[in-house]
Structures are given as C-alpha cells and as structure tokens.
Image (tube, grey):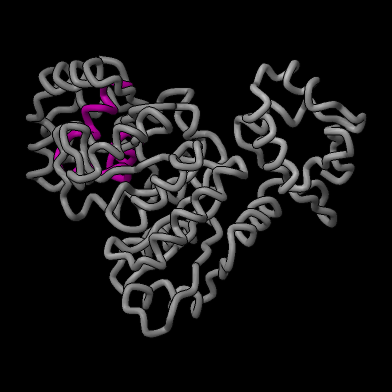
Amino acid sequence: MTDRDALLVLNAVPNMDAVLIRRLIEFFGSAHEVLEASLEGLNKSGLLMADAAQNLFNFSKDKFLSNEYNLMQQRGIVALTAADENFPSSLKDFEDAPVVLYVMGDLECLTQNSVALVGSRAASFYGVRLARSFAQDFVHHGLNVVSGLARGIDTAAHQGALDAGGKTIAIVGCGFNYVYPKENHSLMKAISHRGAVVTEFASHMPPLKHNFPWRNRIISALSKATVVVEAGLKSGALITADFAVAQNKDVFVLPSNVDNERALGSNRLIQEGARVALNPEDVLSQIARDYFPLFPHERKPVLLLSDEQSKVYPLITCEPVHLNELVKQSGLNISTLMNITLSLELKRAIRQLPGQYYVRNENA
C-alpha cells in the first residue's frame, strides 16, 4: 500500500479528522506506518481513545480502497492527497488543512484566482439578487466563485457564475454517493462540467450536520477573499468568515437592513470590523492590493480577465488595430468579438477609435 492509498484510508476512518491524521503521521513517521501499527502501538501513542484506536485497527482497508477506486473510475472523480505534487498550495499552510480532496471537474480551477460568496440558506430576494450579481461581476473580471452548494445564497452564487459563462467551485459536506441538497442535483452536475465539485469526505460519508461547518475552512482557503452576502446569527457563513480571518484573508459583508433577521449575523460582522462591500469593485480592488502589488509604496490595479477576454486583449496593443484584423487573428465571429471588445472597454483596458479601430489604454 502506498502512502497515497494510506491517506485515503485514514481519511475514511470514522471520527478521524485532518488534524488527528497529521499528528498520527508525525508520531509514526508516515501514513503507511500508521496503518501498519499494532493495536497496542496505536493505544500507546496517546493520540487516540481506545474505541478510536479499535476503529482504525479494524477498518476494512482493502475493501474500502477497492470500492473507492471503482466509484472514482465510474464517476470521473480524481482524488488528490497531501502527498501529491498537484495538491493546491493554498490548502497546505494551516494546521487543519485537509489531507484528501475528491474532485469532480476541472482540477486547474482549484489553483486559479477565486473569491468565496456565502450566506444564508433562507435568503431574501435581496440577498439572492446580489449574490447572483456579484458572482457574475467576479467572473467578468476573471475570478472563479467558490461556495458550498447549499440552498439560498450559495445556490445563487453558483448560478450567477455559470450564467456569466465562468467557473465555479462547490465544496460539499458529504461524499459523492450523496447529493445534498437533493434539489441541487442538476446544479451540481453543471458545476462539474464548468468548474469543480470538491469534498474531503470519502464516498460513503452522508451529509451529517457537523460536516458542513468543517468544510467551510476549505471554501475560505481556496479564495482570495470571502464575501458574506446575508447571514443570520447562527449561519454557517459566519464560520466561514472566522476561518477566513484565521487564514489571514479579507472578509467583506454586504450590508442589509438592521431589522432583517436573515442578516443580523452579517451586519454584526461589520460592527466587528469586517470590510463593507457596496459593489464588486470594493472586493476586486482590495484583492489587487493584497495579492498583486508592484512596489511597497506603489500599487497598480490588476486587470483581471475572463478566458474570452484573455484571447482578445493581447491582440490589441498601443498601435491601432481594425476590427476586421481582430476577427482574422482571433478566429471569432464579429458578433462575439464586439461583445468582448465592449467588455474590455468597460474595464477601461482598451478604447475604440473612429473607423472601428481599437487601441490599448496606456494605464491598463
């Protein structure tokens, strides 16, 4: 059994979390050595209660791996472990980082620039509308949207990103044998084709209540910033915000009516010092300052582009280029190209000259 297989097994043992797994590996030397340890050795480590040691020692390792790999092959699921080179670096730098990620979809989007949008399951029309709108704007600026596939704000965030033609990442609180909530089955499938659905839980793990707060640390870790749209006093979105702060990430809140019970928690975050986001630009400008500085005392806004914009923008330089030449060079039809050039103009990345010529803005 490889260390990679051993990590999959350890991650699947009941009542074993990432922190405990790392401590066991540190004590025994490797994930493989943990599984090779005797029951006496596990008990003597002092890291496990007697029943937990018994669970680990008696766990059906070979049967689990056979079932897990069969499911992964059937469903197109990829397992990443902390032992793999392509494990996201953003998930390696904190104590309770996951040791396994199961991914259905695009692995690359896990290492691309993303922003988290989270909030209440019982969202208001206001919250749903703004979550969708912010998600669309983030996508238009080249960011992926991360959320938790829950009802309400999460669903609106994912749908907004997809509607805008972008990528979105759903971090779920159960294994891939389950879909939760069930009404999001089609949304989950769409995300797997246009982004990624991610879980740290083995396939047999049902959507238990305590899984959801725990998965929130992954939502914040994969994101440059966390935006809380609407959250009640007991909302899981507040837990995501706490994880973001612990990970030294910015937290933004969309303000709401002070008597809106669905937003009492998010409004309180503002009172406690969270940044206010009145529009997507408030978030985008801060991300640019935090992650893309030029010099300690001189910062320039970063131009974040969608995949389509990235194909056209390099073709436009300080020398005027005609629309027909852009059609020829890009291979896009004129209607699509004009939509892209318009979006680049709105970002002030380029400007149009008389006669359908385009030129890059000097300060872009």
* In this view, 253 is above or below 261: above
Q: Is residue 209 left or right of residue 225?
A: left
Q: Determine which quarter of the picture holds residue 27.
A: top left
Tell whether 54 sits left or right of 221.
Answer: left
Magenta highlight on residue 7: yes
Image quarter for residue 14? top left
Taking the image as shown, residue 61 lies to the left or right of residue 275, namely left
Residue 76 drawn in magenta: no
User: Visible in this render: residue 200?
Assistant: no
Relative depth, front residue between 356 and 279: 356
- Determine the residue positioned at 21% across, 27% down: 9
Q: Nearer the viewer, residue 336 or 269?
A: 336
Q: Residue at x 52, y 62 (%)?
A: 251
- Chief secondary structure of the magenta span? helix
Query: In the image, residue 95 lies at what x, y percent?
Result: 41, 47
Q: Position of residue 46 (x, y in %)?
A: 21, 46
Q: Provide residue 272's location: percent of width, then percent of height.
A: 49, 77
> Which residues make up the magenta segment?
4-26
Q: How many marks?
A: 0
Q: Note whether residue 32 is visible.
A: yes
Q: Quadrant of residue 176?
A: top left
